[in-house]
Image (tube, rainbow, N blue to C red):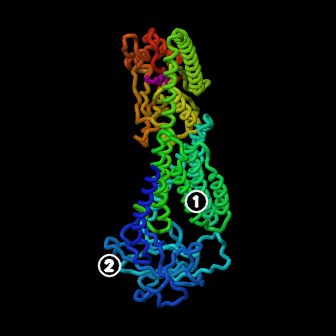
Amino acid sequence: MFRQILYRIAAVAVLLGASTAGYGQEPAPAPLERFNEEGLFQLTLPWRYHPGDDPRWADPAFNDTGWEPVAPQMPAGELPRHGWPGTGWFRRHLEIAPALQGKPLVIRIETPGATVVFLDGAPLMDTKVSGLAPRGGVWREVIFSPRPDHILAVRHTVSLAGRHAESGNPGFLLSIEATDTIALQVAFERRLVTFTVVPAFLTAFLALFHLALFAFYPKARENLFYALVLVAFTAMLASDFGFVHATSDAGKALALRLARSSVLLAIFFILLTYYAVRTRVFPRTWIAFAAAGVALTWLTFFGPYPPAKLIWYVYFGLMVVETIRVETTGETVKREGVKILLRGFQVAVVTIVYQILIILGLLPPIAGFGNVYLVALLAFIVSMSLFLARSFGQTNLHLEQRLAEVQALSEQVLAQERAAHEQELSRRLLEAENTRKTTEIEAARALQLSMLPAKLPAVEGLETAAAIITASEVGGDYYDFRVASDGSLVVAFGDATGHGVAAGIMVTAVKALFSTLGGGESLSAVLAECSRVLREMQLTPLHMCLTLARIMPRSMTICSAAMPPVLILRAASGEIEELGPGGPPVGSRLCETWAERSAALAPGDTLLFASDGFAEQLDPADDPLGDERLAEVFRASGALPAGEIVERLLARVTAWRGEREQGDDITLVVVRATS
């Protein structure tokens, strides 16, 4: 089977080589037809080069067919045949697609020296006087005339004397870009996060998960080596991210060394993972791979800069050859589901070969996506995870089958004893579970009540009272008070969606926000800020219905987010007014502002904040108490002190409920304007 995989890899390599023949004939005219996802067209393949300095070499009609092809960045080991004299000319022919002719584009060049760029024989920009570009380097906006053939000529001057080995390549990088650089930069950052940060978090999580599996079952060594592979992949992704965001040559050099070292570690631990899956005893070749890996990693990290790409190419090739050797020599052991792993390994090998061809400039990236090694990473992760999951499932299945056989043999003798034992065990487990749940619910209820103010504030001209009756399950009702700097009483009254610990977390977050922001002058601004913070906490699908009220002896202002309206009992007329409700709950994405509503207060006027658990309380016949009965009790007890009003309301809902279990928290806050 593995020979078939080898044949497929070889066939793909032949096809890839055949497909790259035309692409590698450089420096042919570069066809500019479209940009990649980052809005770039980078001229990184070889240009025509001639040492020395002659202004005639900028002329488009000059015959440069005899010039030497040289990569413009001149990376280590790829200088011109006779070395770099300090000054030289580079020429690159362009074929501009009709769709881009006559449209404004940007030519940007990154260079460590003094560089002058000519377009069709005319000076375009000089790095000494041009402005800085958003992505680095210098830039100039150009419009290509409506003809397909153009030529770029670059006079490049840079001295190699005194240059540090890690200060970067001595050449230049020229790009043609779209003009909307800000939008492209944002798209680039978003793409970078998508293809580096997100996979890094995924690989780090999987690494911790498989390390935990190994800790629980050390005999499954494949979990350990697979976790170390994922750690190396995480380091590779982090290095890619660090390289892009490095602000100095030293930082980029360190990121590149870490990336190449991580590649070597990943290859080594992939081999060990393969050994753990396919062999009973590791072949002695693992020692040679370990020694070579240590030496190559040391050379990559501490050797000349930039570290040679060939190092990990060869190491990877040796790893592939070793796996083929093990498969063909019959040293493997049978493992169920191993075909899944080998198929993923096959995809990963082909993808990495394609990545190497892209790095060497022999193949273009698909749709501008150059990090195709992420596909290899995904193939390896998916195949290995499926293999381990299947192995775990098959192991459990076999154990179940053996257990069933044993149970069948001893069923007649142990039937009664087993049944009695199971009943006793079930009883104890049920008791333990009930005890645990009861303890957790009591602890959560105590935490919920601890969120409430220890004592009611004393505000001149106002009388306050409050009470909460929690349901059998932890709910999310919440009230709080704060005396503002102007002497007003700020009331927070809310109800988190759902029940249990999640609702308690929401209440805790809102209490912290109210403690910090509750003194603000604008209630709507406080709600907006609370909503913003809760959205950023990503407590989906939890929301918080919340009313904020600023109360003074002769006026009040409320701002409500999906809470029941506040009831105002007018002392003069005995009428009840409603103030509210307002917009959607905080923490959702449905609204950015909440309207404030105000009302005047007279001596004796009483305010009632009641959670929906009061009006929705059911009697034994499943009939709700309702808002009308709430208003009747409130009106009948309106002349009493605030504390007695709360007692009357609680007595009414308790009588209505009867023997029925309370289904939701009931919370009341009463504020009266005194004379």
Which class describes the residues within 10 Å of circle 1: few (<14), some (14-19), or many (20+)? some
**Dot in front, 2 or 1:** 1
Does the segment drawn in magenta span residue 561? no
Which dot marks residue 315? 1
| Magenta residues (range) | 603-612
Percent across and percent down for residue 569 are: 43, 22
Q: Quadrant of residue 615?
A: top left
Which class describes the residues within 10 Å of circle 2: few (<14), some (14-19), or many (20+)? some
Name the residue rendered at 44%, 21% in the picture: 613
- CA gap between label 2 and label 1 equals 50 Å
Percent across and percent down for residue 595 are: 42, 38
Determine if residue 671 is in view. no
The one nearer the camera, 549 or 654, is 654
Name the residue rendered at 45%, 68% in the picture: 362
Does the segment drawn in magenta span residue 605? yes
Determine if residue 26 is in view. yes
Secondary element at image label 1 = helix
Which dot marks residue 219? none
Percent across and percent down for residue 173 are: 51, 73
Question: Disc 2 marks which amino acid?
Answer: Pro
Going by the image, does 601 lie left or right of 627?
right
The one nearer the camera, 38 or 218, is 218
Percent across and percent down for residue 107 are: 45, 73
